[in-house]
């Protein structure tokens, strides 16, 4: 879309300008035109999205505040374990990737998913450490041993190699790996290391696995990406 010349948009906390496709129309009302220009037509209006074409030809999207979402509630608390959450859940046939699955929360996530029947791939920087963890998980759960595949989220080439090597559907992508306050380091591209690892690497991974996730979604009524 064109960029709107509507400069007042950011000054009202209940509105912000966005670009990109808008959901399908349900009809609606004409918005106030804070730009002073005429609104030629209100093309689409949803509860929170209005798309207007100005006489100048500029297309304007207005998204109202999205704070009204209902909170999700469950019976689980901060002290609930992964096993408690997965109790009674059968994940047979589910293919999952856990980044950083060789330690910490990633290890426990991979272990619990494996115990529930999922086929887990540990996406790790250090394959030797991953293999040792896969062995531990396989032995302790008595379930199918996780696969191990190298992935360095700060190295775009390994992300691409991981994506190219992935075959078939994917149902769960757990973007767990991450650095916490590592000090100022940069990737080869010059990107700040924590941002590149925790965010950019996972975005590239998810985008690269889009088709596998889409295939998984058609198989099991949805696929899921979990990012902390
Ligand atoms: N624990 C908490 O209280 C807490 C709180 C808020 C958020 N989190 C987030 O939750 C996630 C897991 O936390 P945790 O406590 O389990 O941390 P952790 O034990 O330090 O594990 C982090 C994992 O990420 C991996 N990793 C780091 N950089 C990577 C890279 N470039 N490519 C691929 N893998 C990489 C590490 O691999 P190596 O083994 O090779 O180093 C490790 O397996 C992290 O994203 C963390 O930021 C944790």
Image (cartoon, grey):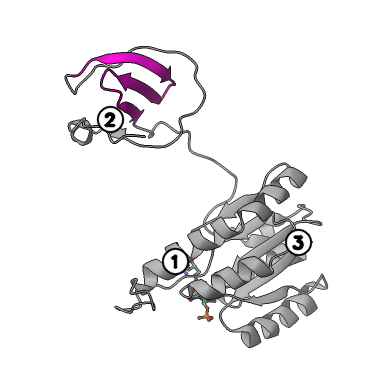
Locate the N terminus by quadrant: top left
Earlier residue among tags 3 and 1: 3
Q: Is residue 136 above or below residue 45?
A: below
Task: Report if residue 44 lies within the magenta region.
Answer: yes
Query: Where residue 162 sits: x, y (%)?
Result: 62, 70
Tally of marks: 3
Q: Position of residue 151 (x, y in %)?
A: 57, 75
Mark closest to the chain's N terminus, 3 or 2:
2
Determine whether label 3 and label 1 are within 8 Å by CB. no
Rendered position, 207 above or below 220: below
Q: Which mark is residue 118?
A: 3
The numbered mark at residue 62 is none
Q: Which residues are magenta?
A: 37-64
Identified at 48% across, 33% down, the residue is: 70
Q: CA distance from mark 2 to mark 1?
A: 30 Å
- N-term mark: 2 or 1: 2
In the image, residue 5 above or below residue 50: below
Q: Mark yes or no: residue 182 visible.
A: yes
The mark found on residue 14 in the picture is 2
Residue visible at 19% across and 22% down in the picture: 34
Q: Is residue 68 magenta?
A: no
Q: Secondary structure at mark 3?
A: loop
Q: Residue at x 57, y 77 (%)?
A: 103
> Which mark, residue 198?
1
CB within 8 Å, label 2 to label 1: no
Q: Residue at x 24, y 34 (%)?
A: 13
């Amino acid at each position: 879309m064109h960029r709107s010349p509507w400069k007042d948009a950011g000054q009202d906390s209940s509105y912000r300008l966005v670009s990109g496709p808008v959901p399908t129309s349900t009809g609606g009302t004409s918005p106030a035109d804070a730009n002073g220009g005429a609104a030629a037509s209100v093309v689409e209006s949803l509860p929170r999205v209005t798309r207007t074409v100005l006489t100048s030809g500029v297309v304007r999207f207005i998204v109202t505040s999205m704070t009204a979402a209902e909170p999700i509630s469950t019976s689980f608390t901060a002290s609930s374990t992964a096993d408690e959450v997965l109790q009674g859940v059968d994940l047979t046939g589910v293919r999952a990737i856990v980044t950083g699955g060789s330690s910490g929360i990633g290890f426990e996530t991979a272990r619990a998913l494996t115990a529930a029947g999922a086929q887990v791939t540990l996406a790790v920087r250090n394959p030797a450490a991953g293999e040792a963890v896969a062995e531990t998980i396989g032995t302790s759960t008595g379930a199918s041993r996780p696969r191990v595949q190298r992935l360095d989220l700060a190295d775009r080439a390994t992300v691409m190699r991981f994506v190219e090597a992935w075959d078939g559907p994917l149902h769960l992508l757990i973007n767990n790996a991450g650095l916490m306050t590592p000090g100022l380091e940069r990737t080869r591209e010059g990107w700040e290391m924590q941002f590149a690892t925790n965010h950019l690497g996972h975005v590239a991974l998810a985008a690269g696995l889009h088709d596998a996730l889409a295939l998984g979604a058609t198989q099991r009524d949805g696929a899921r990406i979990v990012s902390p």
